[in-house]
Amino acid sequence: QVQLVESGGGLVQPGGSLRLSCAASGSILSINAMGWYRQAPGKEREFVAAISRSGGITNYADSVKGRFTISRANAKNTVYLQMNSLKPEDTAVYYCHAVGISHDYWGQGTQVTVSS
């Protein structure tokens, strides 16, 4: 089993920045790619960004390209999402996601609100 715990969410003004963290524990050797998804009120959960096990390959949703950066510190079992130039439409609950050998794992989510 893998446990994922997100942190770093909060309220920020448009144009501001936040950095989300996701700490993994448990059977971490079984984790392959990791990433972030988000779900806004009344909408389906959507992909935001992903990073390979080595950190050498990243992928982003078109809506966040150039503004968000995903990174991974394997020594700390942690994945980060640096979010810059935030917009009101980025408001959502952000979920950490990990691809395991036979299961996908999800964190409990952290709220990000972009509002003036």
Image: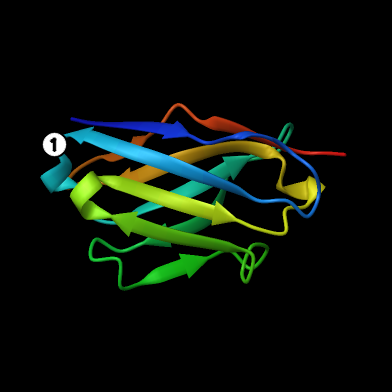
Is residue 71 found left or right of 68 in the rendered image?
left
Between 42 and 95, which is closer to the camera in this rendering? 95
Rendered position, 17 above or below 43: below
Q: Tell me: 59 left or right of 114.
A: left
Q: Residues within 10 Å of mark 1 (few under 14, many from 20)?
A: few
Above or below, 72 against 7 in this view is below
| Left or right: 8 as drawn, with respect to 97 | right
* Point 58% across, 35% down: residue: 9
x, y percentage for residue 92?
67, 38
Classify mark 1: helix, strand or loop: loop
Location of the C terminus (image quadrant): top right
In the rendered image, which residue does mark 1 sit on? 27
Q: Residue at x 24, y 40 (%)?
A: 103
In the displayed structure, 17 sits above or below 52; it is above
Please report the residue visible at 30 percent of the width from the left and 73 percent of the height from the top: 56
- The quadrant of the rendering that contains the N terminus is top left
**Residue 42's quadrant in the figure?**
top right
Visible residue check, residue 45: no
**Residue 98 x %, y %:** 32, 45
Q: Nearer the viewer, residue 104 or 94?
A: 94
Residue farthest to the top? 108
Q: Residue at x 49, y 38 (%)?
A: 95
Q: Would residue 75 appear left or right of 86 to someone viewing this image?
A: left
| Circle 1: residue type | Ser
Residue 47 position in % (x across, y down): 54, 53
